[in-house]
């Protein structure tokens, strides 16, 4: 069975607020070679429809299926809850309008809120969890790279702090959750235990997460990860590439 390609979004196809260089040629290669692919993103600043619109605004015809942690979180919440407190980007709050409840939530969803973290917010979430609400993490990324500001703390350190304080583990929606990788494969009609290649810029959620499932991995250096690769991660990275053009050369060998 032909392998599938799972592709991270930010730091790979979208660099800051711009499409990646050579993205059109990269997408054409995938299409010309009928490579089954899915974009699997931990981004919680936009959901799939918004991502398609982003690329359309640059006249890039993106036809690959997309799953973001926010899309997956919506599906998870819709199946289980009626009242949820949501702390994530304002861009995606509207997706959860039917569930929003900050008085007596059954669950708390935490995603990307940038520099809005503070003691008061941590205390509020802490109290929700202490009162019985489930903690849901769109992802637990340690850090991310923001245009003009460099490496910035992501939601993961704050979520871990809440877990420590409450002695309760968050339900992880995004990578490196095994179910999330499997959902991407199923979205492109592949068995959830089928072979795949992961292309990403994050050593934890992309490289190690995929390698734990037996996948091959391609690290791209256009995002958060820079050389040298720490020794603890070297076994999780099969290929190191500088850009999408080099990724294409690797894929010519694999497909």
Image: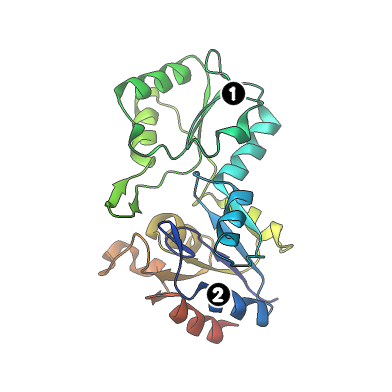
How far is disc 1 from disc 2 in space, using C-alphas?
39 Å
> Looking at the image, how many numbered discs can be counted on the residues?
2
Q: Which residue corresponds to the image point at 47% horizontal and 35% vertical from the top-left?
A: 88
Which part of the image, by quadrant, shows the N terminus? bottom right
Q: In which quarter of the image is residue 242?
A: bottom left
Figure quadrant of residue 24: bottom right
Q: Decide which of 91, 123 is in the foreground and name it.
A: 91
Residue at 44% of width from left, 61% of height from top? 18
In the rendered view, would you say 76 is above or below 197? above
Q: What element carries label 1?
A: loop
**Residue at the spot 36% in from the left edge and 44% down from the top edge:** 154
- The residue pinned by badge 1 equals 100
Residue 141: percent from left, percent from top: 40, 47
Q: Which of 168 and 104 is in front in this view?
A: 104
* x 67%, y 29%: residue: 80
Q: Is mark 2 on a helix, strand or loop?
A: helix
Disc marking residue 24? 2
């Amino acid at each position: 069975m032909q392998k599938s390609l799972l592709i991270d979004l930010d730091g790979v196809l979208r660099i800051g607020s711009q499409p990646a260089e050579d993205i059109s040629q990269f997408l054409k290669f995938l299409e010309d070679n009928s490579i089954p692919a899915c974009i699997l993103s931990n981004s919680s600043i936009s959901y799939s429809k918004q991502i398609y619109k982003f690329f359309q605004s640059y006249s890039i015809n993106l036809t690959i299926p997309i799953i973001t942690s926010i899309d997956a979180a919506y599906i998870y919440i819709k199946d289980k809850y009626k009242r949820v407190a949501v702390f994530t980007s304002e861009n995606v709050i509207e997706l959860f309008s039917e569930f929003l409840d900050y008085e007596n939530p059954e669950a708390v969803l935490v995603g990307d809120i940038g520099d809005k973290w503070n003691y008061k917010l941590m205390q509020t979430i802490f109290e929700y969890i202490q009162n019985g609400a489930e903690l849901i993490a769109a992802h637990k990324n340690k850090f991310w790279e923001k245009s003009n500001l460099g490496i910035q703390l992501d939601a993961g350190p704050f979520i871990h702090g809440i877990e420590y304080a409450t002695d309760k583990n968050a339900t992880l929606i995004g990578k490196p959750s095994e179910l999330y990788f499997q959902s991407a494969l199923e979205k492109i009609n592949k068995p959830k235990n089928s072979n795949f290649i992961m292309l990403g810029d994050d050593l934890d959620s992309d490289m190690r997460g995929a390698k734990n499932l037996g996948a091959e991995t391609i690290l791209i250096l256009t995002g958060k990860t820079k050389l040298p690769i720490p020794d603890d991660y070297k076994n999780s990275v099969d290929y190191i590439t500088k850009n999408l053009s080099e990724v294409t050369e690797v894929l010519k060998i694999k497909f």
